[in-house]
Image (tube, coloured by chain):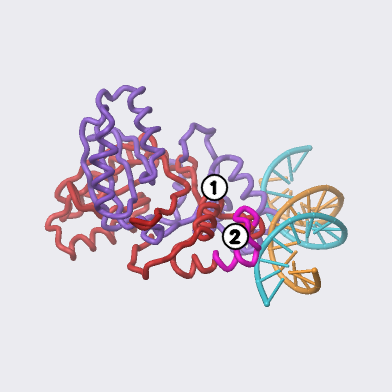
Chain colours: A red, B purple, C orange, D cyan
Amino acid sequence: MNDQQKRDPVLLDDLDVRILEILQSDARITNRDLAAAARVSPTTALERTRSLRSRGVIRQATLDVDLPSIGRGVQALIAVRIRPPSRQVIEAFRDWVSTLDETVGVFVTAGNEDFIIHVAVRDNDDLYAFVIDRLTERREVADVRTSVVYQHLRENVVSVLAPRGAR
Amino acid sequence: MNDQQKRDPVLLDDLDVRILEILQSDARITNRDLAAAARVSPTTALERTRSLRSRGVIRQATLDVDLPSIGRGVQALIAVRIRPPSRQVIEAFRDWVSTLDETVGVFVTAGNEDFIIHVAVRDNDDLYAFVIDRLTERREVADVRTSVVYQHLRENVVSVLAPRGAR
DNA sequence: CATGAAACTGAAGTACT
DNA sequence: AGTACTTCAGTTTCATG
C-alpha cells in the first residue's frame, strides 16, 4: 500500500511530461524506444526517468492485472462510517482494513462517510461474508453501505495538469 | 480506459502465481531476475509471462504516479445518480465522463448510486467547478454526492484467490 | 559509439506423469 | 507419448559510460 506524503513542489518540463505519458502507457518499454518516442537521446531519457523516480513522481512500475482471472470476479465499494471519528480510531481502522486480503484499495474521505473500501472477492457469497462477518466485527463501524461494482474503468494515462495560471 | 470482458476461465498454477506477484511489485524487473526470483530458468519465466499476457491475465505494465506531483493535489469520489437509469443513458454518461480530463476512474455500480467517479484535480476550486459546472450540465444527472479523498491507499500486489473449495 | 549485459530463438536433452 | 522444465549456442538488441 502506498502512502501519500508531502513533497517539495515538483517542476516538470515538456520532456518530463512526455516521458511520463509514454511510461504510463507502457512501463516496460526499453529506454531506447522511450528515447525515440520522446525524441531525445537515450542518455537524456535515462537521466530524466531516474530523476522522476528519485523525485517521487514515479513511484513504481506495476501491473494491471485482470481481477476475474485471479479469482476475484466480484468488486464492490463499501462506504463505512466510524464512531467516534477520532484520529486514533480512524487510523487504526485504516491500517486494519488495509491488511485484509479482500481489500484492493482504501479511500479515507470526508463527506457522507469516513472510508470507502474497494474490495475484490471471489463471488457474492464472499462479499456478503466480508461485510457481515469481518467489517461488523469491528465495534467502531457505525454504518456500512455496499455498492456492487459492475464495471471499473481506469484511466491508464493520467495527464499532467499545468499549474493554475500557467500558459 | 480498460474494459472488463468475459474470458475463458483461466487456470493458474503456483509458478504463474509467483510470477504475477513478482511482476506486480516490480513490472520493470528483467526476465533474468524474474526467473531467479521465481526459481525457474529464464526460458520458462519468459514463456509464462507471455502466456499470462496472451491469456489476458496481465493487461499491461503501468506506472504508479504521484498525483500531487502532476498537478493533481485534490482527489474526490463523486457518487452520481442517473435518471432514467436505462442502458442507453447509463452507457452514454459513462462514456462521456470517462473522457474528461479530471476523471481518473469510473465505477459503474448498483446500490445507492449508479456511478462513483474518481477524480483528481488541481485544487478545491477545480473540484467545485467540476461538480457544479461539468457534471450538472448533463440533464441525466439526478443527484450528486461528493466525498473528498484525504488519502488513497492502493494495494500494489493483489494476491490470487484459490477457486472456492480448492485446497 | 563501444562494451558488456540482457533478450530472444531454436535445438536438444531431462524428468516426471 | 506428453508436458514442463532446463541447458546451451548463436544472434540481436539494449543499457550505460
Which residues fall within the magenta stretch? A36-49
Residue at image mark 1:
B60
Q: In this rendered view, identify the residue nearer to me: B130 or A147.
A: B130
Residue type pointed to by label 1: Gln
Q: Return the x and y of residue B107 as percentages of the image width and height.
A: 35, 39
Mark 1 and mark 2, same subunit?
Answer: yes
Quadrant hosting residue A96: bottom left
Residue at image mark 2:
B38
Residue for point 23% across, 63% down: A92
The answer to whether residue A97 is left or right of residue B30 is: left
Inspect this view and state whether residue B32 appears: yes
Secondary structure character of the magenta stretch overall: helix
Q: Secondary structure at mark 2?
A: helix
Q: In this rendered view, identify the residue nearer to me: B16 or A58.
A: A58
Residue for point 23% across, 53% down: A109
Residue A48 within the magenta-colored segment of the rendering: yes
Residue for point 34% across, 56% down: A165
Quadrant hosting residue B27: bottom right
Q: Mark 1 or 2 closer to N-term?
A: 2
Inspect this view and state whether residue A59 appears: no
Residue A115, placed above or below residue A44: above
